[in-house]
Image (cartoon, rainbow, N blue to C red):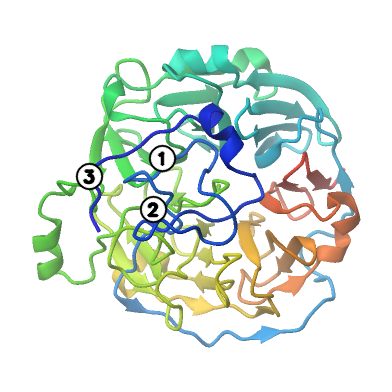
Amino acid sequence: MRHFIRLALGASLLAACSSSSSDSGNDAGSGSPDSGGTTAEGGTTNDGGTTNDGGTTNDGATANDTGTTGDSSAPSEGGTSAAFRAIALPGNGERVTGVYCSDAHTCVVVTELFGDAGHIYSSDGTTITATLVTGDDAYAAMFGTLGSISFLGVSSVGGKVVARAIGAENAFVSATGSVTSAASWTGIEGVTNTTDFGLNSQFGFGTNGTRWTLVSAGRIWEATSAPGPTTTWTNVYSPQAVPPIPADIDAQRTSDPTLCDTDPTVSISPDLDQATYVAADDSLIVAPAGAVNQDGDDTAGVCISLDGGHTFHHAEFTGVALGAGPVGVTCTSSSHCVAYGGLKSTASSAYVYVSTNASMGATSTWTKATTPTLPDDTQLRAVAFAPDGKTGWLVGSTSANGSLLFTTTDGGATWADATTTISALTQDNPLHSVYALDATHVWIGGENDTLVASGN
């Protein structure tokens, strides 16, 4: 279903409408909620004014569905050998959405606080050492935004460390130099065509040196210069817009049926850090497809772009029902990617699929991973790997146990339950983010100021 208008609702105006523990949005067709909660999602909006709870499309490839589930409750011997410890946040009740470290003792932590200001904090790996950025009304005003903004993940792109904004699609918040110095962080209005942007979230940046790509709610933008006050962005992909972008998408799909026609990104509440994967060098973009409430006709799986988001090809996940497509995806290289599902209201929607040839696009193969038995209300929310691409951590939640942690030592083909290694520290709060500097230094974040780390 093509949408005619995008609504942009400020986070501060929606604070009374949503809880940060909700994981679902309204169905774009019926308007009924996906039973996890309300439709607001920290300031992002979808096309047509309803929250979009799905990803993008598949690439025509057939995925293997040979994965099985087991009943493993023993922590994996892989993952990290170091014990986790809790790191205290200032006590605002924030959701930790991302961590980035230049070394084990030089880190930044980014947060969301629905309806209020998120933060960028510095950490030495043991404590929070300073508040670097507060996304309050005065800070948000730099981007022409009424009300506060928050932050949705952080990563290194184009020689900068970039904190992605929730509630200011036109913002560019970045650091050069020491990431733990407040003086290193700048916030600028990173566009000239501000009327084209709303209060949507930023899901990923990438650059190949001459082209910059921004993935926001349902749209892919391109610029020929780094984000700044004189940068003009062009919407290069939003196939369910009216008129569609590209305008001839239907004719293209007639010629090549492997092409996707689903808008990129997943939009559920609260926002997901890995709703679309964008390689830092812009060489690969992978977005979920066939998810609940998602605009587009593609079946459950992923959409893969090798040209900066101008075209996407569809790789189907065999055995996954339409509306239960993955909610997140991340990659460790141009070949190795992991996608995962999990909605509180949809039975059998929690799963993990792995590819070792994702850059093949339409001919890529995706295999269902072996996981511990997953309750129907399991919500998988983020995955990270050590630099070896083999040792990894997957986080989320269940209503029965709150926090959930799985580990892998084979690149995500098999997972073991390691929740008991952190449950006392996380106090059963839902988990939403994970970052691995290496196989020893791992950070896990979640709701209600939850932040734990391993290594010294």
In the rendering, at what x and y percent does residue 294 appear?
37, 59
Q: Earlier in the sequence, mark 2 or mark 3?
A: 3
- Residue 172 place in picture, x, y as percent: 46, 25
| Quadrant (top left, top right, bottom left, bottom right) of the C terminus | top right
**Mark 2 or mark 1: whose residue is earlier in sequence:** 1
* Residue 255 at x, y percent in the picture: 10, 69
- The nearer-to-camera label among 3 and 1 is 3
| Image vertical order of residue 156 relative to residue 399, above or below | above
- Residue found 58% across the figure and 47% down from its top: 270
**Residue 222 located left or right of residue 420:** left
Is residue 447 found left or right of 156 in the rendered image? Answer: right
Evaluate whether residue 160 shows in this view: no
At label 3, counting other C-alpha atoms closer than 10 Å, the crowd grade (few under 14, some 14-19, many 20 or more) is: few
- According to the image, label 2 marks what residue? 285
How many residues crowd around disc 1 within 10 Å: few (fewer than 14), some, or many (20 or more)?
Answer: many
Amino acid on which the number 1 mark rests in the picture: Gly
Q: Which mark is residue 21?
A: none
Residue where numbered disc 1 is placed: 206
Q: Residues within 10 Å of mark 2 (few under 14, many from 20)?
A: many
Vertical arrangement, residue 36 with respect to residue 11, above or below = below
Q: Amino acid at mark 3?
A: Phe
Q: Is residue 410 visible?
A: yes
Q: CA distance from mark 2 to mark 3?
A: 25 Å
Give above or below for 282 relative to 383.
above
Distance in Å between CA atoms under marks 3 and 1? 28 Å
User: Which element is circle 1 on?
Assistant: strand
SS at badge 3: loop
Q: Amino acid at mark 2?
A: Ile
Between 394 and 379, the residue placed more toward the observer is 379
Q: Which residue is mark 3?
A: 4
Whichever of callouts 3 and 1 sits on the residue coming sooner in the sequence is 3
The reply to whether the C-beta atoms of the residues labelled 2 and 1 are less than 8 Å apart is: yes
